Amino acid sequence: MGLEMDQRNMVAWRAAKEVAPGMAVNLGIGIPELVADFIPHEWQVMFHSVNGILGVGPTPLKGEEDQHISNAGGAPVTVVPGASYFDSTIAYGMIRRKKLDAAFIGALQVNRRGDLANWIVPGSRVHGIGGGAELAYYAKKVIVLMSHVNQAGEPKIRRECTLPLTAKGCVDLIITERAVIEVTQRGLLLTEVMYPYTLENVITHTGAPLMISENLQMVE
């Protein structure tokens, strides 16, 4: 189901904790676009966009947008000092040469092994798989930011994906409005539960077995 803006910001705020100073990071379309708003400027994190920017900054204030500067999703962005512009060949070359420390991406489904489905719902019309597959394969760490359930209230974290896969075994961490879940060799490890949800609620709305961390945190 769709998330309210405060929930989307909560997910982005938590995701920002996975970023360290000096990283090169790709932000996907949707919730991932909000992560830049929660990164301290002095950290000098360089956000990468596949449409040809390294150094994407926070969302511009209303009325201060530059129509010539947007992210891969077409949303207006700012750039930080030292930012650079280039064509798609260079943008994808950075990905394929494993220059990105992390990729934050949205998802339709993730399964217990970290397989990712995020590019098509059967019967819908799309232009193609895009750069998601390459980011999933080549980023040093892949972090999924998404709602915990879909519009029908069904779990998006499942034993097996029922939608076409983008990449197999690529997801390292899942962050939703309800929980933070690590993908490990033994399975899915629940490490954080987000307020106001409960452990029981997270388990009920997750379609795959969860191991519970001994250091489980309740995040308010």
Image (tube, rainbow, N blue to C red):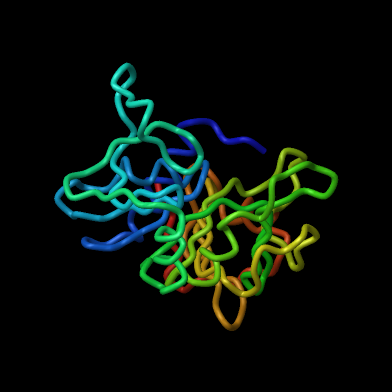
From what the image shows, is residue 20 above or below residue 128?
below
The residue located at (53%, 31%) in the rendering is 4
| Residue 184 as seen in the image, left or right of residue 61 | right
From what the image shows, is residue 9 above or below residue 148?
above
Which corner quadrant of the image does residue 111 belong to? bottom right
Along the viewing direction, whichever of 119 and 156 lies nearer the viewer: 119
The spot of residue 187 in percent (x, y) is 62, 77
From what the image shows, is residue 109 above or below residue 2?
below
Along the viewing direction, whichever of 69 and 121 lies nearer the viewer: 69
- Inspect this view and state whether residue 161 appears: yes
The residue located at (67%, 51%) in the rendering is 108
Looking at this view, name the residue that lies furthest to the top: 63
Q: Which quadrant does the C terminus fall into?
A: top left
- Inspect this view and state whether residue 205 appears: no
| Residue 68 as seen in the image, left or right of residue 151 | left
The spot of residue 83 in percent (x, y) is 24, 49
Looking at this view, name the residue that lies furthest to the left: 42
The spot of residue 114 in percent (x, y) is 62, 70
| Residue 211 as seen in the image, left or right of residue 205 | left
Count the labels in the image: 0
Along the viewing direction, whichever of 87 and 216 lies nearer the viewer: 87
Along the viewing direction, whichever of 127 and 189 lies nearer the viewer: 127
Looking at this view, name the residue that lies furthest to the bottom: 185
The residue located at (14%, 50%) in the rendering is 42
The residue located at (38%, 26%) in the rendering is 67
